[in-house]
Image (tube, rainbow, N blue to C red):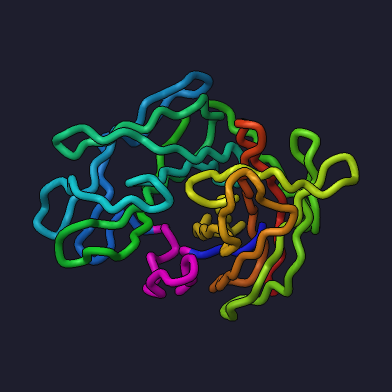
Amino acid sequence: MAGMAGMAGVPATAGASATSPGDGLAAEQDGYRLDSPTVSLPAGRAVRYPFTITGPDGRPVTAFAAVQTERLHFYAIRSDLTGYQHLHPAMAADGSWTADLAPLDPGSWRLYASFTPETGPRKGREFVLSRTVAVPGTATTVPLPAAAGSTTVDGYTVTVQGDARAGTAFPLTATVGKDGRPVTDLQPYLASYAHLSAFHENDQALAHLHPITPVDGDHGGPTLTFYALLGRPGNWRVHLQFRTDGHLHTAALTLHVT
């Protein structure tokens, strides 16, 4: 849960623009729009979600800057903040995209696209846009886990420390351990040692950030430092992704912001 940028004025990594990409809750911002003909997806099986990003001229955007090695980051999460997915879809020559989603449980889902145009009037600016889809069936709401300072995944323990206050930039540190020992063999993932995304409990606002810790081969850890600026108080469900021995791990916990 260390550091969440990409939301409400959150700075990105060191040296990046401080311009806010927004909270990810709108389908359109400054002339850029996330479009899709799909408003419903079936439950219980892998599905494909087609979409396009159109620019201020109304035509599909085809030139995107690579951010953390990818031209577009795609997220999916259900309204109760379960079912998190982080994907990197492929774009066709005409500017159409297809996200291959793992099976979805019934309920309301929000799908986000994070991108930076490489040309046009907003060249170099990050955007986060989203749309919702309905997944038919009987939805069982999962209560949000209580706020906690640590969590475990695949035998790893992730501990987070920081004074999380809304509207104020603050540092967060994430420490990774295993079997009571510090982990020092984190491998680069998306040109960093971790990827973090967080979703606000009440409205699914999205925030994301990468650690400012420099990358030095497969020698990351045990502690990663992030900086965050979260515009809303309340609970955030945080997903910290990191790689070891070629395997991607996703640690999830709840952060309370005052």
Left or right: residue 177 compared with residue 215: right
Residue 6, x across and y down, in percent: 46, 63
Judged from this view, the residue extending furthest toward the bottom is 168
Query: Which image quarter holds the C terminus?
Result: bottom right
- The quarter of the picture where residue 97 lies is top left
Residue 58, x across and y down, in percent: 11, 53
Q: Nearer the viewer, residue 106 or 129?
A: 129
Q: Nearer the viewer, residue 197 or 35?
A: 197
Left or right: residue 62 compared with residue 210: left
Q: Nearer the viewer, residue 179 or 85?
A: 179
**Magenta span includes 101:** no
Residue 243, x across and y down, in percent: 62, 39
Judged from this view, the residue extending furthest toward the right is 180
Part of the protein shown in magenta: 6-25
Residue drawn at x 72%, y 58% is 223
In this rendering, the answer to whether 47 lies above or below 204 is: above
> Is most of the magenta stretch helix, strand or loop?
loop
Q: Is any part of residue 80 visible from this angle?
A: no
Residue drawn at x 61%, y 64% is 3
Residue drawn at x 60%, y 46% is 81
Q: Nearer the viewer, residue 99 or 245?
A: 245
In this rendering, the answer to whether 190 lies above or below 99 is: below
